[in-house]
């Protein structure tokens, strides 16, 4: 399979990724890698210990805009 990725717009690339992910999720043989579970467990533990700071969407947007200059 050869997909013309270089000629696709960003919106088309995102749509293609969403379609691929939806297809994978419908496949009963698909299992996320074990390290995904470990990362989620570590993040949950940090939340439970109060070691995680959450940001609002506006805070995230502001940080991105600051980083872009």
Image (cartoon, rainbow, N blue to C red):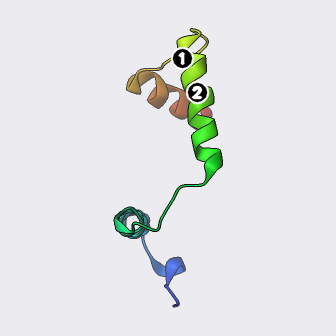
Where residue 21 appears, as percent x and y from the top left, is: 41, 63
Graded by Cα atoms within 10 Å as few (under 14), some (14 to 19) or many (20 or more), the crowding at tag 1 reads few
Residue 3 in the image: above or below residue 66: below
Separation of residues labelled 1 and 2 (CA atoms): 6 Å
Relative height, residue 49 to residue 63 (above, below): above
Answer left or right for 6 relative to 23: right
* Whole-percent x, y for residue 7 in the image: 48, 80
Residues marked 1 and 2 touching at CB (< 8 Å): yes
Residue 69 seen in render:
no
SS under mark 1: helix
Q: Residue furthest front?
A: 29
Please identify the residue farthest to the bottom as the structure is shown.
1
Quadrant containing the C terminus in the rendered view:
top right
Taking depth in this image into account, of 37 and 19 the one nearest to the observer is 37
Left or right for 15, reference 48: left
Q: Up-down: is 13 above or below 7?
A: above
> Residue 47 has which mark?
1
Residue 44: horizontal and vertical position, in percent?
54, 24
**Residue found at the very far top of the displayed protein:** 50
What residue is drawn where x is 45% and y is 31%?
61
Residue placed at 41% from the left, 69% from the top?
20
Could one spot residue 32 in this view of the protein?
Answer: yes
Which image quarter: residue 67? top right
Residue at image coords 36%, 69%: 23
Q: Which mark is residue 43?
A: 2
**Residue at the spot x=46%, y=22% of the render?**
59
User: Where is residue 5 drawn, in percent x and y?
Assistant: 51, 78
| Kind of element beneath mark 2 | helix
Left or right side of 51 for 12: left
């Amino acid at each position: 399979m050869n997909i013309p990725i270089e000629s696709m717009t960003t919106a088309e690339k995102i749509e293609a990724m969403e379609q691929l992910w939806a297809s994978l999720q419908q496949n009963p043989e698909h299992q996320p890698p074990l390290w995904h579970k470990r990362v989620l467990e570590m993040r949950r533990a940090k939340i439970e210990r109060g070691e995680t700071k959450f940001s609002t969407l506006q805070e995230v947007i502001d940080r991105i805009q600051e980083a872009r200059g």
